[in-house]
Amino acid sequence: MADIDVTFRNENNGKEVEVTVSDDMPADAILRNLAEAGLIPNIPGTALVYRGVQLRPGQTLAQMGVRNNDTISIFLNTRGGGLKWVHQKK
């Protein structure tokens, strides 16, 4: 368990925000906290993507190998589906 600085980039509008998070925080909790802080809209189906791989709910940053000063993309689920190109790591 370590605190790391991560840049979250909203791929829908290009905005970035740097946040200090615990590397044992799961993806779904990160999305919830970002939405509660007003940094992203609370849209079901929003995805976090790191190095081309979508983080699953419950999967932690440490499990994905996210390190200090890395960038994670945020893809907001807009009309029409749209996240089919993202690879799921099993």
Image (tube, grey):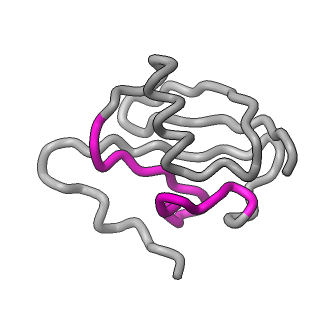
In this picture, residue 63 sits left or right of residue 15: right
Between residues 1 and 7, which one lies in front from this camera angle?
1
* Magenta-drawn stretch, dominant element (helix, strand or loop): loop
The image position of residue 18, as x and y in percent, is 68, 27
Quarter residue 88 falls in: bottom left
In magenta stretch: residue 53: yes
The image position of residue 32, as x and y in percent, is 47, 35
Q: Residue furthest top?
A: 38
Quarter residue 81 falls in: bottom left
Between residues 26 and 48, which one lies in front from this camera angle?
26
In this picture, residue 82 sits left or right of residue 36: left
Q: Is residue 81 above or below residue 85?
A: above
- At 75% from the left and 59% from the top, the residue drawn is 62
- At 46% from the left and 43% from the top, the residue drawn is 74
Q: Residue furthest right?
A: 2
In this picture, residue 38 sits left or right of residue 6: left
Between residues 86 and 3, which one lies in front from this camera angle?
3
For the image, the number of numbered tags is: 0
Q: Residue furthest bottom?
A: 90
- At 51% from the left and 19% from the top, the residue drawn is 37
- At 21% from the left and 42% from the top, the residue drawn is 78
The image position of residue 8, as x and y in percent, is 59, 36
Task: Tell me where the magenta segment starts and ends, as one range.
Answer: 43-62
Q: Is residue 47 above or below residue 33?
A: below
The image position of residue 50, as x and y in percent, is 59, 57
In magenta stretch: residue 17: no
